[in-house]
Image: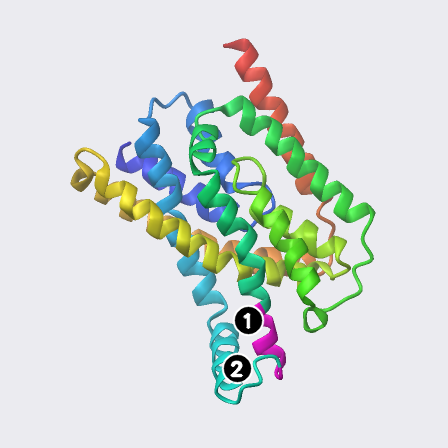
């Protein structure tokens, strides 16, 4: 993978991580559609590590919220009333929602890594994302706010996040689906989706660092990775801002249509080749 490819994939990662269209699918399909011949092991490690760029973006964007949540959780522990404050409850709910995906990632790591080398499988998973978004828009009430979240809601959203470890199933799309089906407004579902992305992206990135050191000639891979990281961080920040403004007024159905069309394009290109 050269620096130009790393830059393009970093922009793709940052732009698509928080939109409900699956960044992992785009990291698989962009090289496939452009007919890039990338080393599968290096590409997988790059795809996971470049998420640290978008992790930096979401931490910076929600820095005030995160400071309030962490401060509230610490006060709750000191006072032996961990659920007394709303921000403290939200922090523990984020941790609870992270557990299913964490377990799925550890148990299915090899299967997930194999899925990154299958554009056809990714295309079918994009159709799952399209289905999730369509169902969530058609069958949700969208009346609850985030301060009304309960442990049951966190587990539902967490289970949807666990499904999204496979490329093509959008993490933000599936978690927003879980939030919408739990009755939250689009904006509340999106904010919870973004906040709960932080622990899972951090864990995945740290594990990928270990894989990076095992790659032959990994030192020469750093410039490409740094370029991808910076590109993902910058585009990721503006992607968050744009989507939060979008969901206040508009439906997620256009993203479902996009996922279905992208899946169709993958099937057509594969057949033509």
Please provide the residue range marked out in magenta.
Answer: 84-92
Give the quarter of the image for residue 263.
top right
Do residues under tags 2 and 1 come within 8 Å of each other at their CB atoms?
A: yes
Label number found at residue 28: none
**Considering the numbered disc 1 on the image, is that residue within a helix, a strand or a loop?**
helix
Q: Quadrant of the N terminus?
A: top left
Give the quarter of the image for residue 48.
top left
Q: How many marks?
A: 2
- Observer-nearest of 42 and 54: 42
Q: Label 2: few (<14), some or many (≥20) within 10 Å?
A: many
Q: In this rendering, is residue 100 above or below 273?
A: below
At 50% across and 41% down in the image, what residue appears?
23
The residue indicated by pointer 2 is 72
At 49% across and 72% down in the image, what residue appears?
66
At 26% across and 33% down in the image, what residue appears?
2
- Observer-nearest of 201 and 133: 201
Image coordinates for residue 114, horizontal then vertical, percent? 44, 28
Q: In this rendering, is residue 198 above or below 273?
A: below
Direction top: furthest residue: 272
**Considering the numbered disc 2 on the image, is that residue within a helix, a strand or a loop?**
helix
Q: In this rendering, is residue 17 above or below 36?
A: below
- Tell whether position 268 is magenta: no
The residue indicated by pointer 1 is 91
Give the quarter of the image for residue 21.
top right
Q: Marks 2 and 1, how far apart in space?
A: 8 Å
- Observer-nearest of 186 and 197: 197
């Amino acid at each position: 993978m050269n620096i130009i490819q790393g830059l393009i994939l970093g922009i793709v990662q940052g732009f698509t991580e928080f939109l409900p269209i699956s960044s992992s699918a785009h990291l698989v399909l962009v090289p496939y559609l452009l007919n890039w011949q990338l080393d599968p092991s290096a590409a997988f490690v790059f795809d996971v590590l470049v998420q640290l760029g978008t992790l930096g973006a979401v931490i910076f964007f929600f820095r005030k919220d995160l400071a309030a949540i962490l401060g509230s959780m610490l006060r709750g522990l000191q006072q032996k009333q961990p659920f007394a404050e709303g921000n403290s409850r939200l922090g523990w709910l984020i941790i609870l929602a992270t557990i299913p995906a964490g377990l799925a990632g550890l148990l299915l790591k090899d299967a997930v890594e194999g899925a990154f080398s299958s554009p056809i499988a990714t295309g079918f998973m994009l159709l799952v994302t399209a289905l999730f978004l369509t169902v969530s828009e058609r069958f949700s009430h969208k009346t609850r706010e985030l301060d009304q979240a309960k442990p049951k809601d966190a587990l539902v959203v967490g289970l949807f996040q666990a499904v999204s470890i496979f490329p093509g199933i959008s993490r933000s799309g599936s978690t927003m689906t879980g939030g919408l089906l739990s009755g939250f407004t689009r904006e509340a579902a999106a904010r919870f989706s973004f906040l709960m992305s932080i622990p899972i992206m951090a864990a995945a990135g740290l594990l990928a660092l270990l894989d990076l050191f095992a790659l032959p000639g990994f030192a020469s891979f750093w410039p490409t990775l740094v370029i991808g990281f910076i590109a993902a961080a910058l585009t990721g920040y503006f992607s968050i801002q744009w989507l939060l403004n979008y969901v206040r007024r508009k439906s997620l159905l256009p993203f479902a249509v996009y996922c279905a069309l992208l899946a169709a394009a993958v099937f057509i290109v594969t057949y033509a080749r």
